[in-house]
Image: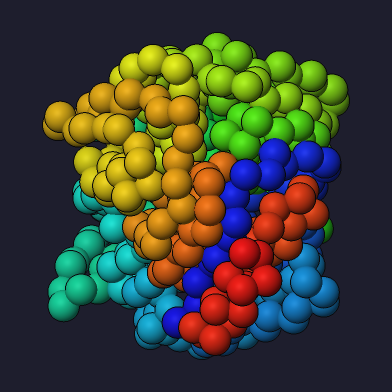
C-alpha cells in the first residue's frame, strides 16, 4: 500500500504555486451539466475527487473532454441518465451537488448518499428543506437520495444552520426555477461566490453570494461559458503553515489574500512574519511559535479545514493552546497520531488542550482524513528522524502533486508504493 516516507528537520524554503480550489471545482463541475452548450473550465485541480466527479458526469451521458491536466470541456446536452450509479460518487461528499444540478435542469435526480472523509456527521436535511420549498418531493431509500418536482418555483428559504453544501445545492436548483428565490442564513465561503459567479457566467441571475442573503431570479436555460476556478484557500493555508511548522520561509503564490485573512492573523499571532502582495503571501517562520487559542467558524472565521494544520503548529508552540472545533465533531483523531510523535494533548468534548513540545520524533502514523493527513505530513517534515504515513489516499483526494511541491521546497519526502521502496528510502536517507 502506498505511503509517504520522509526525513524531517529541514526548514522548507522557496516558492509554491497554489492549484485551483477543489471545493469550488466540485460544485462548478456539477453545475456545468446544466448547460446544453460547451462549458470550458480552466484551473481545474488534478486530484482524485475531481477525477471521480468527471467520471460520474461522463457516466450519465455528458460529453467530457480533458483538454489538458487543468482544463476540461463539458457539454450536458447528451445526458441520458438522471440516476447516478457511479461507485465513485459514494466516496466523495460532493456527490450531492448533482442533485441540485439535475433537479434544476430536469426536475428529477437520483444520487447516492455522500461519502468522503469520516470527520463527523454531514446531514443533508437543509438540502432537502430547500428542494422541498422549491416544489420538490424527496425520498431517502437504500442509501440514495431521490428528488422529483413537476415545477420548481422561487421561494423564501431560511436555512436553520449555515451549510456550504446546502447553499450551493439549492442555489443551483433555484437558478433554473420559476420566479424569485431568497436564501437567508447562507454560507459565505469563497467557493460559494465562485460557484455563483460561474452560474452567472452561464446566464443565471444570482446576487448577494458572499453575504448572508442570496437573491436569485430564475432563468429558463443556461448557455455555454469559459471559466477559471479560484485558487485553493486551504491548500494555500496548508503551505503557509508548512513554513511555520518547519521554521521555514515560503512564498505562497497564486492565492487571494482576502481569503486568507483568518489564517494569516493566527500565523502572525503565533510569531511568524508575513509579507503580503497582490496574489501571494510570504511566510517566514520563527524559531519557536507562540501558543494561541483558535475556534473554527464558518467563513470569514478560521476554517475547519485548517484545524489540523493549526493543531500541529500548536504542538510545537511554547505554552498551552486551546483549540475548539465547532463544525465537525470527529476531527481530532490526528491528535492521537501526533502523540505517537511525542506531542502532548488531550481532548475534552469539542475542545483540545495542546501543550507545546520543543520537538517531535519520527514515527509510523496514518492519515485519518484529507486535511489531517496533510497536517501529519507537515509534522513529519518538522520531526527528528524518519516518519511514514499510511492511508495517503485521503491526502491525494485534495492536494495536487503534494510530495512534489514539498520536495521543491527542500523536503526529503517520497511516495513509496511498497515496503521495498520504503526500505530503500530509509537506507539512503539514513
Specify the quadrant that holds the C terminus: bottom right
Residue pictured at 41% horizontal, 57% vertical: 363
Pick the front one: 281 or 411 = 411
Q: Position of residue 5 (x, y in %)?
A: 55, 65
Quadrant assignment, res 84: bottom left
Answer above or below: position of 98 versus 287.
below
Residue pictured at 30% horizontal, 33% vertical: 344
Quadrant assignment, res 92: bottom left
Q: Position of residue 57 (x, y in %)?
A: 55, 77
Pick the front one: 10 or 47 = 10
Pick the front one: 181 or 245 = 245
Q: Position of residue 200 (x, y in %)?
A: 68, 45
Q: Is residue 412 visible?
A: yes
Please state if 61 lies on the left or on the right of 365 as rendered: right
Residue pictured at 38% horizontal, 83% vertical: 87
Q: Is residue 79 visible?
A: no
Please state if 410 lies on the left or on the right of 156 as rendered: right
Total marks shown come to 0
Residue pictured at 55% horizontal, 12% vertical: 269
Specify the quadrant that holds the N terminus: bottom left
Q: Position of residue 296 (x, y in %)?
A: 38, 27
Answer above or below: position of 347 versus 54.
above
Answer above or below: position of 73 versus 343.
below
Pick the front one: 143 or 265 = 265
Amino acid at each position: 500500500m502506498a505511503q509517504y516516507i520522509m526525513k524531517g528537520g529541514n526548514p522548507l524554503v522557496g516558492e509554491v504555486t497554489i492549484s485551483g480550489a477543489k471545493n469550488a471545482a466540485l460544485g462548478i463541475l456539477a453545475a456545468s451539466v446544466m448547460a446544453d452548450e460547451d462549458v470550458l473550465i480552466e484551473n481545474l485541480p488534478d486530484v482524485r475527487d475531481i477525477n471521480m466527479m468527471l467520471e460520474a458526469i461522463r457516466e450519465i451521458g455528458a460529453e467530457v473532454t480533458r483538454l489538458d491536466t487543468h482544463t476540461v470541456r463539458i457539454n450536458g446536452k447528451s445526458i441520458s441518465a438522471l440516476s447516478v450509479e457511479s461507485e465513485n460518487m459514494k466516496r466523495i461528499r460532493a456527490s450531492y451537488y448533482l442533485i441540485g444540478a439535475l433537479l434544476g435542469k430536469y426536475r428529477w435526480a437520483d444520487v447516492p448518499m455522500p461519502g468522503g472523509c469520516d470527520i463527523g456527521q454531514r446531514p443533508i436535511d437543509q438540502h432537502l428543506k430547500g428542494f422541498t420549498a422549491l416544489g420538490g418531493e424527496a425520498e431517502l431509500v437504500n442509501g440514495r437520495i431521490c428528488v422529483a418536482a413537476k415545477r420548481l418555483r422561487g421561494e423564501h428559504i431560511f436555512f436553520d444552520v449555515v451549510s456550504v453544501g446546502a447553499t450551493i445545492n439549492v442555489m443551483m436548483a433555484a437558478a433554473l426555477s420559476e420566479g424569485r428565490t431568497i436564501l437567508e442564513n447562507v454560507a459565505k465561503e469563497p467557493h460559494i461566490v465562485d460557484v455563483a459567479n460561474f452560474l452567472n457566467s452561464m446566464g443565471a441571475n444570482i446576487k448577494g453570494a458572499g453575504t448572508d442573503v442570496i437573491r436569485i431570479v430564475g432563468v429558463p436555460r443556461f448557455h455555454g461559458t469559459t471559466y477559471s476556478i479560484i485558487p485553493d484557500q486551504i491548500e494555500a493555508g496548508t503551505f503557509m503553515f508548512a513554513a511555520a511548522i518547519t521554521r521555514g520561509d515560503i512564498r505562497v503564490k497564486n492565492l487571494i489574500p482576502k481569503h486568507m485573512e483568518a489564517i494569516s492573523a493566527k500565523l502572525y499571532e503565533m510569531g511568524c512574519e508575513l509579507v503580503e502582495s497582490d496574489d501571494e503571501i510570504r511566510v517566514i517562520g520563527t524559531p519557536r511559535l507562540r501558543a494561541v487559542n483558535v475556534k473554527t467558524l464558518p467563513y470569514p472565521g478560521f476554517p475547519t479545514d485548517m484545524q489540523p494544520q493549526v493543531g500541529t503548529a500548536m504542538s510545537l508552540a511554547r505554552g498551552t493552546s486551546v483549540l475548539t472545533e465547532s463544525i465537525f465533531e470527529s476531527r481530532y483523531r490526528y491528535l492521537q497520531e501526533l502523540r505517537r510523535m511525542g506531542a502532548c494533548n488531550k481532548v475534552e468534548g469539542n475542545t483540545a488542550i495542546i501543550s507545546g513540545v520543543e520537538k517531535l520524533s519520527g514515527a509510523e502514523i496514518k492519515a485519518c482524513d484529507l486535511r489531517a493527513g496533510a497536517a501529519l505530513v507537515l509534522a513529519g517534515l518538522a520531526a527528528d528522524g524518519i516518519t511514514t504515513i499510511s492511508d495517503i489516499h485521503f491526502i491525494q483526494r485534495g492536494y495536487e502533486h503534494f510530495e512534489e511541491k514539498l520536495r521543491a521546497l527542500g523536503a526529503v519526502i517520497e511516495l513509496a508504493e511498497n515496503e521495498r521502496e520504503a526500505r530503500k528510502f530509509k537506507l539512503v536517507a539514513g
